[in-house]
Image: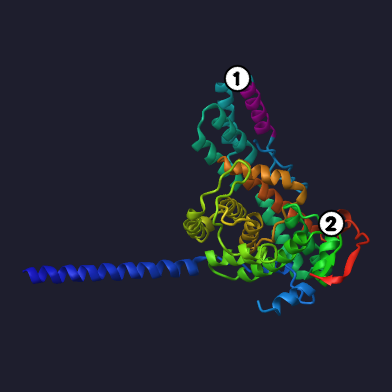
Amino acid sequence: MNVTVIIISILVSVICVLLAILQYYYIGYKRATSVKLYEPLFTDLIVTDFRSYHMVNYYTSDDEGFIYPPPSKDYNKNRIDSEVENCLKAALAYKVSGKNDKALRLFEHAAAMAPDNPEVLIHYGEYLEEMHKDIVGADELYFKALTHSPNHQIIEEKRDMLKEQLRAGYDEEVKRKLYYLHIYHTVGIEGNTMTIPELEYLLKTGMVVAGKTIHEHNEILGLEIALHYIKLLTTANIIGVSEILEIHRRVMGHVKPLQSGVFREEQVFVGGHAPPPPEEVPHLMEMYVEWLNSEEAHSMHPVRYAALAHYKLVDIHPFTDGNGRTSRLIMNLILLRSGYPPVIISKGDRRKYYKYLKLANKGDLRPFVRFIAYSTDETLNTYLGGSQFLIHHVESPPVIQMNQNRNV
């Protein structure tokens, strides 16, 4: 009898172990095969130019409240009809005057007439949050507003228009200029002072630009290499910790080579925000990539997914330096893998960008997500405008004094 019990126990244990192993490999297989990859059409906007001095050299070497952005100029449909608009105005007036019961009834009536209207949903959510402290109900309305946002619908329409332009043949010189514009804004938001003509000269020739620091030169060189690595990653099924470390190694390899591609080992402070202690970073990064590759993340709207991926990495702050650039590259990798072009966060929007990150640190992610959606829309306008945008927004190259005797 005892022998039978022992044998059964052993068999049960073996079956449990086999099931655990099978589950482990099945989950890995599911992750590797369930990611929906789109045609990486917009990777062509990251220009690969092996005539560039720098690229040839690298590849042959050994080594507090949200200000709503204005609606797109092209947006003329899905307007609130007059009845809903009047109802919403009256609700807001009652809210200001303190007549909360009447305000609530009018918000409910407006939401019933226009259940998918973002403006109604946002104001209704703000009312619930401010007057009734109903954060859960408000958040549901905010999420619904984001899902049905006309800006998101317009973004998708513009994305499809840009796809058609690229398939029909997009001017290579314009594409190159827009690529330099992307680099200019990405490093500019960190304080780099190089102009577009200066960084173009640097990347094409490898020559030092007079009057600019070596640090500024190296930021641009590192970013270009990282962008080309991102281009390669668009066909990868999973973004892991090793890929993120490799992105950072390229971003910071010229600037701080000893700190590039490795997690920080000391506590850092970002303004009034204290990121997690260094000993928690490896585990937090494992959790981050698990979320990054999860069905939950992939089921989101790509713009929301990209914005949250950006913020979550900045919040962990895994590196001593280069967290912002690495996070924006991860964001653009997600957008590229989802059929969108790489987003430009304008140098002129620097204050808004950091303001909304601070709000996110306080627990309100919505303004940051909306800001990324706004930046996506503006980027699409830039690409769709093409040469006309460059004529009206990018100044003619000034006379640049270069040091002709030194290479970077």
| Residue depicted at x 59% and y 46% | 269
Decide which of tag 1 and tag 2 comes sooner along the chain. Answer: 1
Inspect the magenta stretch and tell me whether residue 90 lies in it.
Answer: yes
Rendered location of residue 347, percent (x, y): 76, 51
Q: Quadrant of residue 113?
A: top right
Query: Identity of the amino acid at label 1?
Result: Gly
Rendered location of residue 65, percent (x, y): 65, 36
Rendered location of residue 144, percent (x, y): 56, 44
Q: Quadrant of residue 53?
A: bottom right
How much space separates mark 1 and mark 2, taking CA atoms? Answer: 47 Å
Q: Which residue is mark 1?
A: 98
Specify whether residue 337 is in view: no
Query: Identity of the amino acid at label 2?
Result: Phe
Q: Is residue 397 left or right of residue 321?
A: right
Residue 389, numbered circle: 2
Specify whether residue 66 is in view: yes
Task: Write the start and end of the magenta stretch as one range.
Answer: 82-96
Rendered location of residue 360, percent (x, y): 59, 43
